[in-house]
Amino acid sequence: MALKELPLERFPTPNLLRELRYLLTLNHPNITRCYALEHAREGRYLVLEYCEGGTLRELINQVEQGLWLPVKLVLGFVDQILAGLDHAHGQGVIHCDVKPENILLKPTPQGWQLKLTDFGIARQPQPVPRESAATGSPAYMAPERFYGQFSPASDLYAVGIILLELLTGRRPFSGSPPQLMHAHLNQRFVCPEGIPAPLQEVLEVALRKLPLRRFRTAAQMRSALAAVAQKWQEPAACWVGPRLLRQSPPGVQVWDLPANGGLQKFYVCEDPSGCRSPLLLRVTPQSLEWLELQTLALGAPPLACFPLAEPLQEVVFLGTFPEALAVSKSSLLHLSPTRIRTLLSFEERWQATWLEERQELIWATAKEIGAVQWLPTGPTAAQPFPEFHCYFRWPWQVPTGSLPRLLAFSEQLVLLVGRGRQWVDMSVLPYPGVGQTGVQPLCYRLPLDPRGEVLSLGERLLFAPSEGERQGGCPHLGVVQLNPLRLRRWFLKGWPVQMAKAPWGVLLLCQEGEGFLSLWLYSKGGDPLAQVAVPAASRVLQVGKKGRVWLQVPKAGELQGFELWQLDFNQLPGEGHAARVIPLD
């Protein structure tokens, strides 16, 4: 639930009771529910339905910064707004302040559910005597509203402006309140180029100066948009928002990867300081090899080769070159070209997550949780890792046979358990510490695909839909952050097939058509920075600290051969948007 504070100086008692009456009588899926009015010593509060998706304003801000929104998705959003207004108008309530800030987003497994909120200045067709009706937000006010007049057509005028913002990221008029008033009253609306003709007609009718010439009802405007949606065939490249040119891979260096005819994985171990040449780690189910990249083309023998008792599931490189941690079914291993050392052994299923900023590995079983701190060998440290220590046991009973997926925010651990195919139970608790017992987690149930890839960026988690959930709909990522809880979507141009954390944010490998992929560079806030073309079936092996990205790429003309590509994003074109904003160092 959410609390809306109602200070007496801004919300006199008659206004408060009026908004409360409207919210309690308007029962519709696209209008925020009100549960109660609370009086406390600190003040008065409305207890409202909580919408984790934030406001429509936040989504429109992303459109301004380059978010991709397919036209049919925009039409669906506007249809929901009109559905809520149609119900309110049918009950004799005119909102009078329709704007993106007063439209909340409620996440559901089917997508966003939009909800109208803040009926603080809503009116009935017959105004109350001596009460000013010339209030609202000037950027969205119909011409007659500046003279204290209003009707359902006034709300529809505001919806037309929101439709234009969702399509272009811009409003028809801008400026100070007096300038906006003059523009709404006198300046002719000119539809921007690039908007499809059927939508131009809808916008032209919705934004007419005279109320009687606009759509008379929300249902009438809904019908006009439904006709457009029914006939609209969305081209594969028709996306709303600023476009980024698809660039060729920058600064490519290529090496042939060795082949042995069996299962093998490659990892690139890069010196964070850049002083020494990278090493290549080749892992098969039975063995592990360290290879020197500089001599790879010469067929030089491996620097080191070690047998494996069981296949490795994950490898993460430490801040000290060349060392790594490896996770197998029953062990945590420390890897280096000189030896393999077992740090921990488990007799039951376990999960682990590496916290790069803390140089710490958190592990969990169904019964307990613990951590291993990386302490590089130095004058005061004889061993890189201290003895294993279990910090505390779970404060609740984990169901038999179920082991949560373990991830981390910047300050908390996150445990994820799937509930069916469309929901995730997320438990949040502090990092383990010595002596901590009985810590109760914060628990949330979120409409996310529990089977897809999940990546932590520190302040937020990214959820990529699994392959079975990519049929139809708009390509997207689910984005979760805390304090306050927010669940948003990053809409993409293609479905993500791989995600990798990067110094500037995140690197997404997206399938955008038959036979080709794109590498998308996104900031931590979800702003697209650059788009780079890569061959089909490529995989990201490593994202370096100095703007270098390593890919495994199929060799042209060979069924099983692969190449190692190193891309240097420092060589992106200087006039490009990405080169100006990506902090590569």
Image: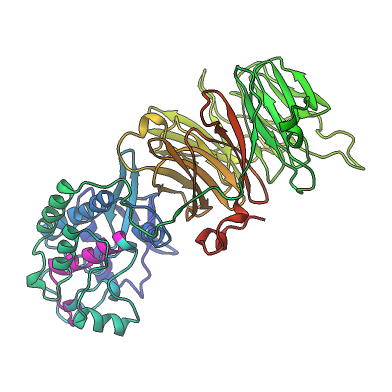
Q: Is 268 covered by the magenta stretch?
A: no
2 left or right of 364?
left
**Split into 4 quadrants, where in the image is the C terminus?**
bottom right
Placement of 219 over or under 436, stated as above or below: below
179 left or right of 501?
left
Tell me which residue sits at (50%, 61%) in the image: 577
Which x, y percent locates residue 323?
Answer: 77, 34
Tell me which residue sits at (16%, 66%) in the image: 206
In front: 228, or 421? 228
Placement of 506 over or under 165, stated as above or below: above
Which x, y percent locates residue 230?
Answer: 15, 46
In front: 349, or 556? 556
Which x, y percent locates residue 443?
Answer: 48, 38
Which x, y percent locates residue 157?
Answer: 19, 68
Q: Give the extent of the magenta segment.
A: 144-167
Q: Main secondary structure of the magenta part?
A: helix
* Residue 314 visible here: no
In front: 445, or 458? 458
Q: Residue 41 appears in which quarter of the rendering?
A: bottom left
* Residue 166 visible here: yes
Q: Is 166 covered by the magenta stretch?
A: yes
| Total tally of numbered discs in the picture | 0
